[in-house]
Image: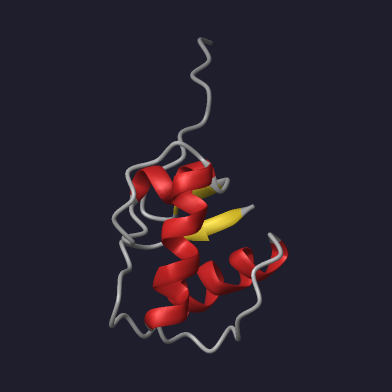
Amino acid sequence: MGFYTGTIQHGSNNQDTKRWQEFLRSQGYDLEADGIFGDITKKYTTDYQSKNGLAVDGIVGEKTWGKAGFSNASTPITAPQTTL
């Protein structure tokens, strides 16, 4: 799906929030992807978490991002090791 850089929650205002809102829109939630994590984003986040067997806390952390198919951008990707 894509990458995220950190945890977001009510009051967050950044690109990760906009990315999350765009994901929620793709899941049928009716909200504006403005990058501001307000009451509506929290409501839809808790609904998404509830429907997907996640802790319902309104915080988009590693497990919520992961369930949505996102990877942490700061996790290094390592190439397979080969022997010569």
Count of numbered marks: 0
The residue sitting at 52% across, 78% down in the picture is 18
Picture residue at 58% right of the left edge, 45% below the top: 69
Report whether 62 appears left or right of 81: left
- Of residue 46 and residue 64, the one placed in the foreground of this image is 46
Residue 24 location (% of width, % of height): 60, 65
Q: Residue furthest top?
A: 83
Way the structure is coloured? secondary structure
Can you tell which quarter of the image residue 25 is in? bottom right
- What x and y, as percent, mark residue 29? 64, 69
Q: Residue at position x 46%, y 79% from top?
A: 40
Quick check: 41 left or right of 30?
A: left
> Which image quadrant for residue 13?
bottom left
Q: Give how far across and how far down residue 5 sits, in percent.
A: 38, 63
Q: In this view, does 58 lie to the left or right of 80?
A: left
Q: Is residue 33 above or below residue 71?
A: below
Viewer-nearest residue: 83 or 20: 20
Residue drawn at x 51%, y 54% is: 48
Q: Whole-percent x and y of residue 3? A: 52, 57
51 and 19: which one is in front? 51
Q: Up-down: is 74 above or below 17?
A: above
